[in-house]
Image (cartoon, rainbow, N blue to C red):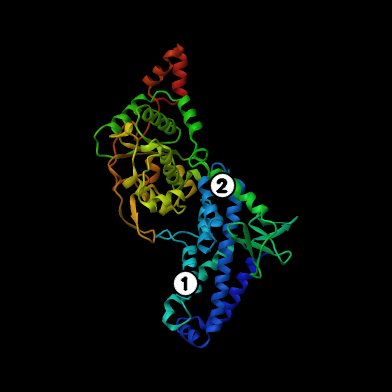
Amino acid sequence: MNPFQQYYQRYVEIKSALSNDLTEDSFPDLILKQPARLNNLFMAGLGMGTLFLRMGAVIQMSQKLHDGDTNNDALFMKQVMDNLRETLPSDTNWKNLWYASIQAGSVWEAAVPRDSNKNTVLDRFVTFRNKFVHQYIRLVPEHLSELRKGLQIMEEMSAVYCLFESGEITLTEGNYYWNQNGNNLELHPFVQEGDHEGLPYLFQGMYENKSRAKFINTVRGDETVPQPNEPLQSKFQPMQDALRGGAGQVFDHSERMQYYLDCFVGREREVQSVMDWVNGDSTNNVLPIYSEAGMGKGALTAGIIDALLEGDIPVMYHFCGSGMANSLHAVLYHFILQGKKMPGMNGAGIWQMEDESLQRKMERLPSRYYDAIKLFHDLLDTSYSPTKKYEGKPLVIIVDGLDEAGVANSQLNISDWFYTYNDKDEPEEDWQSPEFVKWIFSYRSIANYGKGGFRLDGRFNLESNELMQPLGGLTEVAVREALKRFDVSEEFIQTMMERGAVV
């Protein structure tokens, strides 16, 4: 079964029948004389685009939930909950889920490339659909320009059909699957059987105080209520459990820290130089650490964090790793949660908020990237209130592995954090980080990412440090010092230096 083909062909057939009337000269007459035929085209295009958007999000979401670890993909779990469980899903919610589920370098990403404003055809489609459905755009000559844009948007959405053309929805033992290129992906419980046997129904949201789900038929458009709702509850419950407790298990870097520290040797000079910068009066507030792979940036970062903690200097840190933990969106989410657990005044974390709107945002953290940036700005600018032992000391914020952060979403850049944004998520001006904050970013060699390295040049006061720009291998002195206590032979030392490419 391929409802995508049915919707696509209906759109193509109606458009073909109107081809002579859609020219620049004839289109105004079509609006005046045959609005019903034009309305049929728009309804066919909107129906096609809506199906592509929602089922595309479901397929990608199902794949990510199938492949991922519920306990570690906290940001993704939250986005699913916010967009499906906590609200009645709109096309905006499905668009959010598409973006949350999309994998970098996939055919899904290639099919909806972002323009210079970071928008895709999905953004344009949802905006137009909402305006058309609510009659802010109508089939009248006064809206000629908007209608032409709408036709172009629907044509762009029709190109997304390539994602579904070679696949089909199959029913096996009561559960629906997406079968494409030899892969059989279970869509249950987000696609289920309904009143019309054999036709797939798509999850629409939780109703009646979130106790009842509704599904809409992907072919006929009618709604149904499944009996019972346990499959959905069983899917949502692990997500709720994973999110419960804030930044504990879901962003736990303790094992990685311990691994690095167990094998951390020979970087005393580098760590001390960072501590001197942190405790000094330099106005340079960003320290880049970069090198080729394998030079020990992660271990050095762990050593720096350990030294900061030993020195009673407040520090937030994140090691970019697998899954959504790569994303800079997830890193922001972690820092906001991490601050709630750091020692602050009155034992309530370092974020002390009098503003009620901020308090509400902290109770229900924003899932959208730019909203998370705005919240983080507000917290640092107005709500930072550490315990007395941290008074007069800088807050150090560390992101290890910026190059890995590009794996989950290459569209996000660390420079995004240093702009203010309007309601359209467009950058307005530079955001000035508070003077008490010092930032450390590590990534692979600057040569791989242009002169500025992750757009860090120009808008930042970068600290120069020849020990870590780039970070080289261990020195012979460091190796000899580290091995002194083991009383090893000179031959062993020489072998270690050769195999470790010691400089």
Q: Quadrant of the N terminus?
A: bottom right
Image: 421 above or below 393: below
Q: Is residue 171 visible?
A: yes
- N-terminal of the two: label 2 or label 1? 1
| Mark 1 Cα shell of 10 Å, populated few (<14), some (14-19), many (≥20) | some
- In the picture, measured across the screen, residue 319 lies left or right of residue 186, that is left
Give the Cα separation between the discs numbered 2 and 1: 34 Å
Residue at 37 percent of width and 32 percent of height: 471
* Type of the residue with mark 2: Gln
Q: Residue under circle 1?
A: 131
Image: 494 above or below 186: above
Q: Can you give x and y, in whole percent of width and height, for residue 92 in the image?
A: 50, 62
Front one among 434 and 62? 434
Q: Residue furthest front?
A: 346
Q: Can you give x and y, in whole percent of width and height, for residue 154 in the image?
A: 52, 70
Q: Residue under circle 2?
A: 240
Q: Can you give x and y, in whole percent of width and height, for residue 270 in the image?
A: 34, 28
* Type of the residue with mark 1: Lys
- In the picture, measured across the screen, residue 357 lies left or right of residue 251, that is left
In the image, which is nearer the foreground, mark 2 or mark 1?
2
- In the picture, measured across the screen, residue 128 lies left or right of residue 283, that is right
